[in-house]
Structure formats: structure tokens, C-alpha cells
Image: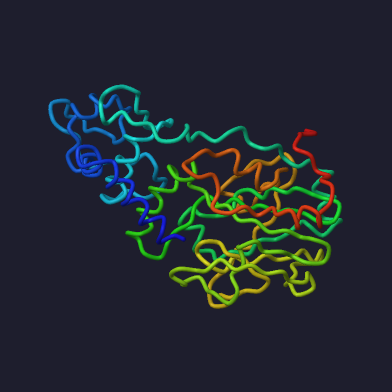
Amino acid sequence: MYSSLISLAFFLLASIGPSVGLGIALAPLHPARAFLERSNVRRAVSVSGDEGGDPLLPVNPPFINSRRSLLSGSVAAGFGALWKGDVASAAAGDDPCRINIGEPVTPGDELPAATEKEIEELHEKGYNIVVACPSLDFKGDNELATVYVAVYENGCEITLLFLDEDRPNQCEDCLYDTIRRPLFGRHCDIESVFIINDEMVFPGTYSGEQVWGEKIPSHGEKSIQLDQFDRHGEEQKIILWVNTWNHLLGEKNNNPDIDITYQHALPAGSNESKESKNFKIRKGSRNEVDARYKGLMTSVSKVMTEERQKALGKRLFLKKSNE
């Protein structure tokens, strides 16, 4: 899937046409101010203090959080000039550079937080999980920030939102980071699991035996009995192990030689915070989480099937706040 997305990036740039695609792709190398003004783009790259000359290399490419490389800046500015969003806006008109692709990429309203009573109910039902992730993922600012839950009569839908994901190859990672926001309307990585009766269901999010260094991890489908999962602490919370760099999950630790950080639910009323290294619980299904973001494609997979919906039964945690 990831190789296909990278190929898609080059295809999009090439298919725009030589007068636009190539010019935009190479723009950050020496992006003339006249070009940016003509396309009516709010600066896709930070310009130098020398008002009489062209800008220097990009300081903060628009679709990159922590990476500042020539490759990421080049492709980022290309998509920025084409993308109708908060950072780069291409106005309609006759200019071939004024092309709009997709909708604004600003996320929709955040879903409501779970109350203290609801978090206690999750614990009573056995749905209050612990997420165990290799600590090196935190160094790349990719950690889990939010867990969304949708509780049903016979189970729970759990959606995990990681701030980002880093591919092992740095060049591929820069390019992939650049195309994620135009494609999905987000940088973050979203993974989902279900608890249905006494099983945890992985809808394309199962790691199997794959380890962190796997170059192209395959997305597995699997149902596993809950008694097969490792447990944490006296409360015996289910541990979800993050086993691959793209946050595929499993019932056991596939990386015993790597330092692990255990992430727990924050108390009700807390906010997402990198410093805490724990996650906030909010109420929402995968479909509701995906609906916050608008890109060329909203999601790479549809996790809720008719069969799962029927097995889960009526939804109990509704999408409204009791705070």
C-alpha cells in the first residue's frame, strides 16, 4: 500500500503537465517570488530576509511537522501550490497554477471526551486498554495521542490516533509524509480494533510475527481470544502491543530487545500532551474519526462491516458530551 502511495505522488506531479507539475516540483530549489505571487499562494516556503532576492531553501515546508529536507520541501511546496487548505491556497482563475484539489485540510471539530463515569465503565467492562510501544517511536513524535471508543451492547470499537509514522527509509519517509495530508487530510496515523464478546478483532491492523524493522509490513486480519493477551498491573488491563513502525498491533511483544513505553488512559478532564506520554479517551467510531479529515481519500479501509455491526449490537456511547 505504501509503495503505491509513493508511486501515486509522482503520478500526480507528472500528470499535472510539464508547465505546472515540473515547475511546482522544482519550485523550492529557487522559487521566484513572481511565481508565488502570480499563483496567489500564501507562502509555501519561508522566504529570506533579503527582499531583493529569491528565497533560500525552505525552512518549514507546509505539510511536514519535524522533517526539513530538500526532498520534502520540494514536493511539499508542489502540493501546497495545488492544495486548497490553511497553509497554501490556490485561488480559482485562468492561471494554470491556480488549481484546487480536494477540500480544506483543517480537521473538523474534535470528538467529545469521555467522562470519569464513562472511563470507569470502560474499566469495568474490560475495555480500558494499555498500549505498549517501542520508546524510539516517541523520538520521532509519532506517539499515540488519543484513543476513541464506541461502546456497543456486545463489545467496543477502539480507534487509536498516532501523531505520525516514520518509514525506515528517510527519503521514502519524507515523500510519504508530504503526500499524506493531500491524500488523507492528515499527518496522523489511525488504527482500529474491535472487542466483540470474548475476542479482539483486528480489521487489517494485525502485526502477526512482524517486527519493528520490517520494511513493508503487511496488514493482517485476525480474531484472537482475549485470554491470549498479555495483561498489565493489578487491574489486569489488556495490553495492545505496537509491533511495527506503521503501528500494526498484536497480543504479544515481537520486539523484546527494544525499550518499551507503556501508555495509559489520562484522567477525565486532561488534555492530550506529549509530555504525559499517555492518551486521552474520547467518544467516537472510526467513521466519525475519519469524517474529521478531508483529503483525496478519507480512509484506506472501511473497518465496520455489516457482520461486525450485527455482532456488536446497539451502540451505547453516543456522540455527545456529558462534560
Where residue 171 sits in the image (x, y, percent)? 32, 59
Residue 243 placement, left or right of 251: left
x 35%, y 24%: residue: 91
Q: Residue at x 39, y 45 (%)?
A: 64
| Image coordinates for residue 1, horizontal then vertical, percent | 46, 61
User: Which of the 4 image quarters holds residue 76?
Assistant: top left
Colour scheme of the picture: rainbow
Quarter of the picture containing the C terminus is top right
Above/below status of 272 relative to 133: above
Residue in front for this viewpoint, 294 or 18: 18
Residue at the image position 37 percent from the left and 39 percent from the top: 62
In the rendering, at what x and y percent does residue 198 appear? 82, 66
Count of marks, rendered view: 0
Q: Which residue is at the front of the view, 210 or 134?
A: 210
Q: Residue furthest top?
A: 93
Position of residue 114 measured from the top left corner of the image (x, y, whole percent): 75, 42
Going by the image, does 217 lie left or right of 72?
right
Q: Is residue 98 above or below residue 15?
A: above
Q: Nearer the viewer, residue 233 or 20?
A: 20
From the viewer's perspective, is 92 left or right of 314?
left
